[in-house]
Image: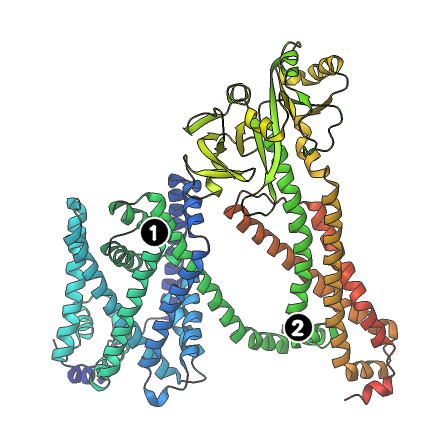
Amino acid sequence: MISVEEQIKEAAAPDEANVPITAGRKSAARRSIFWLQVVAFLLGLALLVYIINRVGVQPIFDALAQIGFGLFAILAINGARHLIRAVALRVAVPPEHRHFNVWQAFTTRLGGEAVSFLTFTGPVLGEATKAALLRKRVTLVTAAQALVVDNLLYNLSVALFILSGACVMLATYRVPRPVFYALLVIAVSAFLTLFGVVFALSRRVMPASALIKWLIVKGFKRRALLARREHILRVEGHFYHFYRHRRGAFFNIVALDLLSHASSVFEVYVTLRMLGFRPATAAPFVIESLTKVINFVFGFVPGTIGVYESGNVVILKRLGFAAATGLALALVRKAAIIFWTVVGLAILATRTVPTATRRVIARHPRLQTAMDNLVFSNIAHRPARTLVSIFGVGIGVLLIVFTVGLSHGVLRERGRREASIGAEIMLRAPGTRGLFNSQGFLMPVGHAAELARIEGVRAAVPLGQMADTAEGGFGSHIIDGINYDEYAAMSGIHLVEGSKLTAGDVAIVDTEWVKEHKGAHVGDTVKVYERPFRIVGVYEPPGGGRIKIPLATMQEQVGTEDRCASILVAAQNPAAQDAVAERIHQAFPDDQIIFTRDLPELYAAGVPALNIFIDVIVAVAAAISMLVILLAMYTTVTERTRQIGILKALGMSNAMIAWVIEQEALLVSVLGVVVGLILTFGARFALQRASTLVVEIEPRWVLVSLLIGLLGGTIGALYPALRAARQDAVDALSYE
């Protein structure tokens, strides 16, 4: 090894062989690396799809559903790790150059990490982005040196963390021989790395530069290494200088890096607890340390997509967890990373988009002309107010599309469940009104035996059905009263757990109800008719009401013996159900006949109160859109009174001025409709993943929301437009 001073002197001396790599070779090398990373990304994506396919989508969603709002805690922990690293970056900058606070360091880190995560260049462009974001407060050279020190110390802390994690796993868990040797190699590699750094710092030698010199002497990549030799020497020299002259900051950064690793371990522990596990103290530590090995080895894969998730699956399976748990852990943590990446992109946008926009406009006169008009100028110079207006219209669209979709979706879903009970025909007593039974039980149970004797009828089963207040006191749910053996023979339901219905206050529930009520199982109670019913079984497939009780118990509750709400009729040949219905009509001419195939649409259209409710929602949404646009355009006209006066003085007609105001309102309305639809699809996805509710986005109501948004915007801007058009040019020019 050679000392620092000797190495610097040698690098300063001219070297006739130090010929720079040509631009053509550099360009070819960059292209090769880019395409290799593209291939790695595609292979990683394919690996992720394969893992998800092997594990199954439903177990993953079940695991993620357990996280729920706990995701916000995971986001906070992940953000705290970024904050700790931001403090470390600030400490790495010398105090005399530290002209930025922790918040600015935090936003700088988020912006750089977003670039590192999303681009194929990874940390190279990410670290350059951080230096660029700090350049207004710190010189580029100082920022680059601080980033180098911060990253080198972080990598050393990673080596220490990996070494300790491998040792903990070897000491705590019994692993197969191949895994044992792999962990041993990892531990030895990490130890040698740390030992080499400590030795170099204590003896003041520069191992990287010495290694490059040796490779050059041996003729290995001579031209490339000669071109980079001086840069590596400067990096090593600054690192040694930092250690010698700022030793307190050196160890403070190491401590902060170790604290960031501790936050990662805590994140793993919290996530596993949310997934329903009580992991041993060593498990999260081992998981995070081995995850860092994966991130280090496969750092060339953009976003470590595929390898990160599959690595978590392998690690957790080795520790005794299910594959779905490993994949869920990886996806939750990746979601936190993506969240802060989006925040970082937003920070980059606020820093770069305005400047870039001004440059583009300055280079293109046509764009400058377009931006000078009242419409685009107002939107560009009042972004906050424009965003509020867009979201105001978007909320109106959300009210219409989501509310209607939820109402119709829930009703159609109930109709589909009613239609999937193995019967083609539903027979109801004369005088029964509506689809929701509220008149009590009117149909004699004895009709079922008579119906069973009609030609073409396979089975006729009495059904009791009543609405009951939902748990929590909000809304209602449907309870079915059945004779289990008859109903099961007709519908094909079977028990997956527990026993069938007998007599008394007992109930069976379907598998969807169990998923919705996390932790529910046989032996628990469910509240029906204001009293507890014991759950004795879980059945599938779902059909009809999600809770079923004995028909006799429901008859006793209603106070009508030997009567039911309807009789379900199953045809021997479902294709001949119309002919069977005709025979039933001849035998029971006064009874109501409903085909179960029609139930989804009948439920969606058969609730008069729902139509009134939808009309009210549409009116409210239109009012919101109109008032938001009215306020925004009125403020615009008031602020731009002088500009309007100039336009009138230059000869612009009243109609043209009014049309400019209407143009801005229409543009904001269109953007609001788009944002509203995005919010609707987002809310739909979240609701359907968190519950059994169904939201159906209907194209007809999307078109209605578009028309209402445009109409509301047009009407809302009408008064401000007319006010602008009626202004006197002289008064407008003198307005202050």
* Percent position of residue 47, x then y: 37, 46
- Label for residue 248? none
Residue shown at 19% from the left, 57% from the top:
166
* Percent position of residue 25, x then y: 36, 66
Tell me which label, 2 or 1, sits earlier in the chain: 1
Residue named by callout 2: 385
Residue shown at 31% from the left, 61% from the top:
266
Going by the numbered disc 2, the residue's amino acid type is: Arg
Q: Secondary structure at mark 2?
A: helix
Q: Nearer the viewer, residue 717 or 138?
A: 717
In this rendering, the answer to whether 309 lies above or below 596 is: below
In this rendering, the answer to whether 55 lies above or below 329 is: above
Q: Nearer the viewer, residue 507 or 325?
A: 507
How many marks can you see?
A: 2
Q: Nearer the viewer, residue 288 or 657?
A: 288
Q: Secondary structure at mark 1?
A: helix
Q: Are marks 2 and 1 in contact (CB under 8 Å)?
A: no
> Viewed as shown, does residue 718 lie left or right of 270?
right
* Percent position of residue 46, x then y: 40, 46
* Percent position of residue 268, x then y: 32, 57
Image quadrant where one finds the N terminus: bottom left
Going by the numbered disc 1, the residue's amino acid type is: Val
Residue shown at 63% from the left, 59% from the top:
675
> Viewed as shown, does residue 592 lie left or right of 144?
right
Residue named by callout 1: 307
Quadrant location of residue 208? bottom left
Query: How far apart, in angstroms, are the residues tagged by discs 2 and 1?
Result: 44 Å
In this rendering, the answer to whether 651 lies above or below 120 is: below
